[in-house]
Amino acid sequence: MTRRKGPPKDVPVPETRNRPISLKDLAAHLSLSSATVSIVINRKPLSDMIPEYTKQRIWDAARHFNYRPNIIARSLRQQRTFSVGVLLPEFSDGYSASVLSGIEDYLLQKGYAWLAASHRHKQDLIQEYPHLLYARAVEGLITVDTPYQEDLPFPVVSVSGHKHVDGVTNIVLNHERAAELAIGHLHQLGHRKIAFLKGQSFSSDTAVRWQSIRKVCKRLAIEVDPSLTAQLEGISPSPELGYAATKKILATGAPFTALFAFNDISAIGAIRAMQDSGLHVPVDVSVVGFDDIYGAAFHIPALTTIRQPLVKMGSLAAETLIARIASEEKRSDVVEVEPELIVRESTGVPRTVIKGRAISAHS
């Protein structure tokens, strides 16, 4: 028989007369000050100075007695909502989900709530949602791969934002370094004919990444052939966009030995398109993705990719926003993060040239 777990041994059962236990009750029964319990429960910076044993006692008692902080009372007392808004294209795609994970992790540690909305790349929603979130009394806004041009009186942090907007901090990847890593890897393997999948026209990263690719290709004397370039079209987060774009490139019959995709999802679609055309990755063609989403390592073949530190970018965005809310400072700046090349199974030394079908390079 399983016994019901009782309260922590050093915590007497509080007499609350059928009302929810308050922070004061919790502090009294732990023989601690209300300030100490509040610092721990609200995850304030000073909690780092409280012994782990004491913090564990507080959390054990809070869980056992089902203590819930009175957010409304705190908000009224401090005239703050301790909430932020998050605006992103999709909840389901690997990029947005990873960034959101980092945002959630940091906000949870700091005791903030968040309201998230997805706009599905609809311009009216992109314009309307910041105002809607402001009306819900959020204290700041994080946008993810979303253009922000509204003029609202709260701090904004934009992940993958590249436009200078007054009062907005942009969290961006070093795209030139990313292009150097990806194209440099293919160049070192011996690839000179490289196909490219460009991002959709509405993606924040498309223009800056393509500019970086062209710059690095020029430096390495690699021709960017228009017949080997296709742009992703559509708003679906499915690999089918990469599949369709790759089919267009294959239909030209132009020879290439490698493909650099805009993201991992389109790279997965590209690999399927090649397989359906009788080609094998990486024997006939090497493929490099971008982002390093969770599924990249488990795809067959495992995907060589450029890792964006997406979770870190989300956490950094949340940390930056909370700091700006606290300082009440309105500024425009850029925080740059570095990419990493992750080499797996989808790239190798070129052994074939593609021209309608696979032809041995030695035949």
Image (tube, helix red, strand yellow):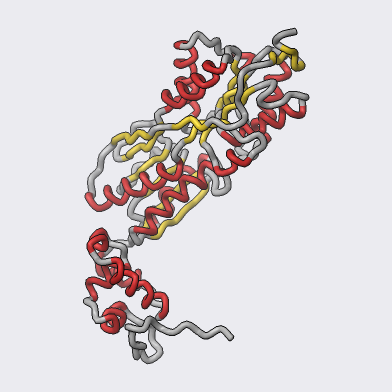
Give residue 173's quadrant in the image: top left
Q: Indicate left or right for 306 with 48 as reference.
A: right
Q: Which residue is nearer to you in this view: 129 or 144?
A: 144
Residue 228, image quadrant:
top right
**Going by the image, does 198 lie left or right of 53?**
right
Question: How many labels sit on residues?
Answer: 0
Residue 258 shown left or right of residue 54 in the figure: right
Nearest the eye: 230 or 151: 230
261 lies above or below 29: above
Res 147 → quadrant:
top left
Q: Is residue 75 visible?
A: no
Residue 49 visible in this rendered orientation of the protein? yes
Residue 342, above or below 252: below
Q: Quadrant of the C terminus?
A: top right
In the rendering, at what x and y percent does residue 55 appear?
31, 69
Q: Position of residue 222 (x, y in %)?
A: 53, 11
**In the rendering, at what x and y percent does residue 306 appear?**
50, 31
Please determine whether, in this image, residue 106 is positioned above or below residue 217.
Answer: below
Name the residue: 49% across, 46% down: 98
Task: Please tell me which residue lies in front, 113 or 40.
Answer: 40
Q: Quadrant of the N terminus?
A: bottom right
- In the rendered view, tell whether residue 355 sits above or below residue 321: above
* Residue beneath the point at 73% across and 18% down: 251
Of 280 and 87, the residue lying toward us: 280
* Residue at x 68% of width, y 35% of height: 240
Spot occupied by residue 137 in the image (x, y as percentages of width and height): 36, 58
